[in-house]
Image: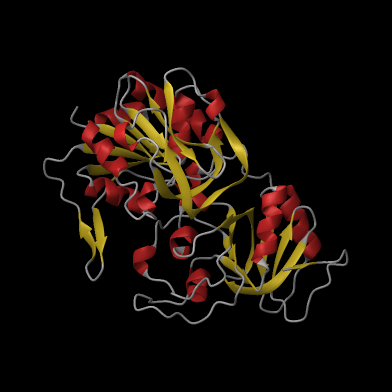
Amino acid sequence: MAFSAPSHAQPKGATGVLVLADGTVVWGKGFGATGSAVGEVCFNTSMTGYQEVMTDPSYAAQIVTFTFPHIGNVGTNDEDVESHVEGAVGCIVREDVTHSSNFRATREFAEWMAGHGKIGLSGVDTRALTRRIRQSGAPNAVIAHDPGGKFDIDALLQRAAEWPGLEGMDLAQRVTRQKQEGWEGGYWRLGHGYGRASFEAKPHVVAIDYGAKDNIFRNLVRAGAKVTVVPARTSLEEILALKPDGVFLSNGPGDPAATGEYAVPVIKALLDMDMPLFGICLGHQMLALAAGAKTTKMHQGHRGANHPVQRVGGVWGATEGLVEITSMNHGFAVDAATLPEGVVETHRSLFDGSNCGISISGKRAFGVQYHPEASPGPQDSFYLFEKFVGMLGD
């Protein structure tokens, strides 16, 4: 990564650039889509799963710096897409994207990025950029790609500086489904692909889509539920008309307090009627807001597939203290110091002690900050889906 001089001198052969809101200019080789995009620059420490990361709606309005240097070497395929709505706007990688070498690959990563309108930047010292994010926080920036190497740096800088950032931004409405649908996808098996869900005599879960990953719904089906997915702004009356046995609150992008302006009143009403509730990531944060806690913007966030989380709170019996290896993707968190009486912290990050789970006493409602459906453990966290579906007949 080349931090430019004040002149913004462009190295020979540079076809891509990252312009931070503070004026820092990082040159490299562009790949994928051409043009420019604005977002918050974060980093992800996962060694695999880059296609799932790029298609996760929780990354909307974000530019992902991959700390693992070899991104793109297994290509892409149609089965590893987490959602067909907006995900990350771009990515930054160390090494040039090489030809894929994987029996499941159907398309090269650079070609896939171009087809999905996502901009890539290679040849960057991602370790230096990651250190900068850790020290100074996640910056706003513009990523741009032009095969001819023509960039208006002043205009890109102005765009980065004027972008308001994720705090206070409701992005769930940009990535949610536009209409109700019955989920039909089953669990994936190598050589068989995705199965079909069976809805016979199954507990019914209504899943509110704030920007959900599809694999969450597959895990709910695997745990024994049938699933109906509804848009983020679905009213309480519309949810109850579907006669749910339980309601799931999905992950998603943006500031939970902003999305909570319309989501929290619905969740509060569901809590009041003791509807079984399970929230993941953004859904976990909004469940906490509905219970009276507060959320906060994190300095750098948690994004990766190796985050240790410990079971705490005195609610786990013989498994109290057990550590799960989890996948995370969030830039906001529940402030554990604001949890009101009756809300128990059930999981805690061993990286920084931040809240990773809650349970509401006297209610059939709980949430976790991490992504159990991503299975980095690989099965450490599937019990959460079983726990939720097990509540539905109570």
Position of residue 19 measured from the top left corner of the image (x, y, whole percent)? 73, 61
Q: Is residue 60 left or right of residue 214?
A: right
Furthest-left residue in this view = 201
Position of residue 319 measured from the top left corner of the image (x, y, whole percent)? 33, 37
Position of residue 275 measured from the top left corner of the image (x, y, whole percent)? 29, 26
Residue 234 in sight: no
Residue 10 sits in which quadrant? bottom right
* Front residue (pair 321, 32): 321
Q: Is residue 239 left or right of residue 286?
A: left
The residue positioned 54% from the left and 59% from the top of the image is 45
The residue positioned 26% from the left and 68% from the top of the image is 190
The residue positioned 23% from the left and 52% from the top of the image is 184
Position of residue 185 measured from the top left corner of the image (x, y, whole percent)? 25, 55
Quarter that holds the C terminus? top left
* 393 vs 88: above or below: above
- State how the image is colored: secondary structure
Residue 107 sits in which quadrant? bottom left
* Front residue (pair 247, 65): 65
* 271 vs 305: above or below: above
Residue 164 sits in which quadrant? top right
* Front residue (pair 150, 256): 256
Total number of numbered discs in the rendering: 0
Quarter that holds the N terminus? bottom right
The residue positioned 22% from the left and 35% from the top of the image is 390
Q: Is residue 92 left or right of residue 355?
A: right
